[in-house]
Amino acid sequence: MWTSFRTVWLLALANAISASAFPLMMLIGSIIGARMAPDPQWATLPIALMVIGTACGVIPATRTMARLGRKPTFIAFNTIGILGCLLAGHALSLDSFQMLCAASFLLGITNAAIQQMRFAAMESVSLEHGPTAASIVMCSGIIAAFLGPEMAVLGQSLSSVEYRGSFWLGAGCFLTGSVLLLLLYRPAPLKRIETHSSTARPLREMLQNRTLVLAIASGAVAFIVMSFVMTATPVSMHLHHGHSIADTKWVIQSHIAAMFLPSLLTALLFRFLSIRSLMLAGLVCYALMIFIGLIDASVMGFWGQLVMLGIGWNFLFVAGTALLPTAYAKGEQFRAQAMNDTVVFGTQAIASLSAGWALSLISWQQLLLLCLLPMTAMIIALLWHRKAA
């Protein structure tokens, strides 16, 4: 398997190293933002702008790959990531919140290209092995989940300016990933994909399909709750509850690992659970997260909350992703996928930005209770879909 999957393993390694910069930013972005922002309500703006940057970078990244190929695009966008990390470090030197926000946006643009590595992996193997290749690359996010926060803490005192060294290490990750791709990556020829946009129905007509609405709702609710809680966690743990940065790092690492580890059991889960049952399991995990948060604000309490958050996100996102291809007609895949990604990334950005505003006005427990609103909307979507079944 190693020989036939050589490119897949290489892409997984490059993904694990390059993507480490994003959990690094997730851990310290809001902490730095709370210190530098002109108002505490804007503490999570850097994280929100990284999500917005990802949404804005998807189309430029895919078009560049279609024109220049995957290898030059990956290296070019990694270079943007290096510039973003260096700009973030310089922003700390100047105590410039605006510059930090610009750097976060650049990191988001880079993330848009790195997200395409799973598709590059699928192209490098036969059609029947495509899902396995994508899973290998996605599971490499577990390595990034631990490596990124470790670098954030390691770089905290690496220079005279706190956390500037963390971004230097992030730039090193993008550089290392680029070198690996430059020297070892041999991309498969891009396959021609026939588009049938002329046969696609208008969006309003497509949205009359309750299955499509449920698939989009599952992905959107997964990201709304996850981003809302995860973005606020470092500020709440470290600044409001007084837990150490090391404990905060461990909680974030555990959360990101919990987001990806269940993917190793995806085939088994679908063997015993229907898609709607998996969505309900995700909502149960979110409910457990809220329950733990209401009764326990210790380090272990935060750990339990964030692990449940990660597992719940995985169940809802995987279920929505699996349901989406069954919800549109031939020739509508690109329009449906674009609509899905727009809703998911848009709501994720709003949730990330809202987290800082919410933390400045209400308690952590009240913030968790706000998550009941999107969860209720998801239950309504499930009941609406079941009624039509």
Image: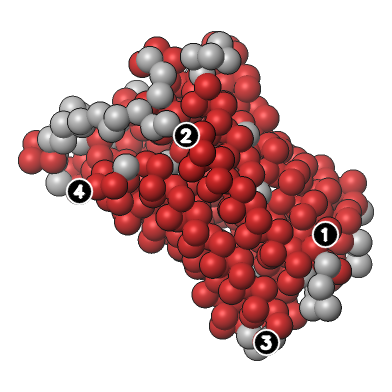
| Residue occupied by mark 3 | 94
Q: Pointer 4: residues within 10 angstroms few (<14), some, or many (20+)? A: few
Q: Nearer the viewer, mark 4 or mark 3?
A: 3
Q: Amino acid at mark 2?
A: Tyr
Quarter of the figure with the C terminus = top left
Between the residue at mark 1 and the residue at mark 2, the CA separation in whole angstroms equals 31 Å
| Residue occupied by mark 2 | 185
Task: Give x and y (percent) for residue 356.
Answer: 65, 71
Which of pointers 4 and 2 lies earlier in the amino acid sequence?
Answer: 2
Q: Residue at x 55, y 71 (%)?
A: 103
Residue 29: tell me if it is visible: yes
In this rendered view, identify the residue nearer to me: 234 or 203. Answer: 234
Q: Amino acid at mark 4?
A: Arg
Between the residue at mark 4 and the residue at mark 1, the CA separation in whole angstroms equals 48 Å
Q: Residue at x 83, y 78 (%)?
A: 160
Which of pointers 1 and 2 lies earlier in the amino acid sequence?
Answer: 1
| Residue occupied by mark 4 | 204
Q: Amino acid at mark 1?
A: Val
Task: Give x and y (percent) for residue 83.
Answer: 54, 67
Q: Amino acid at mark 3?
A: Leu
- Say left or right for 258 vs 382: right
- Say left or right for 9 vs 252: left
| Residue occupied by mark 1 | 153
Label 2 residue SS: loop
Is 227 above or below relative to 16? below
Q: Are marks 1 and 2 in contact (CB under 8 Å)?
A: no
Which of pointers 1 and 3 lies earlier in the amino acid sequence?
Answer: 3
Task: Give x and y (percent) for residue 179.
Answer: 55, 46
Q: Residue at x 25, y 35 (%)?
A: 333
